[in-house]
Amino acid sequence: MEYFIAFLIVLPAFVLAVQRSTYLMDYVFFVFSLNRGIRRLVDFYINGAFNPLSTISLTPLIVSAVLLIPALSRFHLLTPNSRNVATLIMVALGHGLIIGFVNSGVGAFYSLGEWMAGFGAFLYAATAQITPRVADRWMRSCGYAALIVAAYGWYQYYTIPEWDAFWVTEVKFVGYLGQLRPTEMSVFSTMHERGPCASFLAWAAIPMILNSRWRIIGSWATVMLLLSVVVLTLTRTMFIIVGLVAMLQPALSKGKGIGRVIVLAVLMGVGASVGMQYMPGSERITKRYDTMKDMQNDGSFKGRMSIFTTGLPWVLQHPVGTGLGSSGFGAGRIGGAGGATQEGFCDSGYIEVFSQFGWIGGLAFFGAMAQIWGELSSRIRQGGRDPFLHTGRVVLVGCLVFLAVGNIFGGFSLFWVFLGVSLNRMTKPAIKSQPTALPTTHAMPWDQPQTALG
């Protein structure tokens, strides 16, 4: 039954790919956001036991792999600079895979799959022959998936469903996530951890904050709902990223969007001062966030600083790195932990990137990030007005700041899609002195006009 359910989850992805439908990306958002919740229901009601190597947990990697089929066939549609970005990232992944296979064996391929989930979405979005309407729909689809996660998050906070309690007990997260009593446990909703849950919700909210065209039903009320569940995860870092991105938008866009920053600040201020007074369990939440007032003495902050200060000398002494599979999903699958991250450099993304990719791969990866910034800036100077251009630079900076506390690049996330769309030919301003027609190549099935589904 578990295999059958996994088959039912991945089947629509293959159908959409065959039909060349751009709704494939929309579907991927829902699979990534809901698959772990489905897995817990299957374990509790069908298996009657926790399966640490559940096939259902692999469905996000499978559906994201489907994105690579059309993406690789359209690789020639990338602009030269965008092609350089993709090539540099592939150099990093290739180096990490070779070294990782030597050190970790098959675990390197599991970790590669996790990285390719994000990078594949980036390539798909960058090469797709789409219109602004389709790109906007992708942003909103992520928002609707996040809305489901957020609504279930409040249900989880007030009730602690028995299938969730069963999972928390089996993976020995009691204590780490709080106690299995309503309002006394950190929310992780349909995700496998509270951190990924907070990250998914925050990145879904960021486009809604930055531009009204990406908001879904409920508008600002929905934004506050998503952020309220981020509060329930007790993950403080994402609020720093949300605030940073919101302030960077007007700073990098000559003041445009300052009104949205004010609206966000007012809503968050009212929510923090009024909402907390009536919410059960608010004392525990307030105590957690009050530590941000004294970051120098915060245990989490000091721990991350310790990882960085001990990790930097390690990186300098190991120019080749340990390769993919040394941490993250690959290490967890081989170790039988169902995807749990190993202890090490996982709380310092910069150190983890260099530990996995070595000097060569690490420099190639960050060279790709610099190329993204340069290409977006170049299109803006050429007169590009697409909102993905200005906002793409903001999103890139937010990702690089977040990398200080965790390697968010090593998996699927909305920002990968956002950066891909920002580099798509759709956002490239037309230059009258140059032909605007796409280069002629051998026709591929994916290059045909979109069907009604697309």
Image: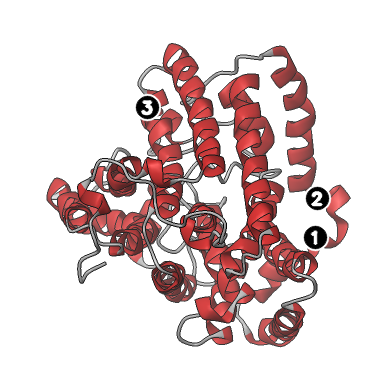
Report the side of 439 relative to 313 (left or right). left
In what quadrant of the picture does the C terminus appear?
Answer: bottom left
- Precedes in sequence: disc 1 or disc 3: 3
How busy is the neighbourhood of tag 3: few (under 14 within 10 Å), some, or many (20 plus)? some
Could you tell me the amino acid type at mark 2? Answer: Asp
How busy is the neighbourhood of tag 1: few (under 14 within 10 Å), some, or many (20 plus)? some
Could you tell me the amino acid type at mark 3? Answer: Phe
- Precedes in sequence: disc 1 or disc 2: 1
The image shows residue 149, relative to residue 217, as above or below, that is above
User: Could you tell me residue 242's position as x and y percent?
Assistant: 67, 65
| Tag 2 residue | 298
Mark 1 touching mark 2, by CB under 8 A?
yes
**Residue 11 placement: quadrant:** bottom left
- Residue sitting at 29 percent across and 53 percent down? 39
The image shows residue 308, relative to residue 444, as above or below, that is above
Residue 76 visible? The answer is yes
| Tag 3 residue | 109
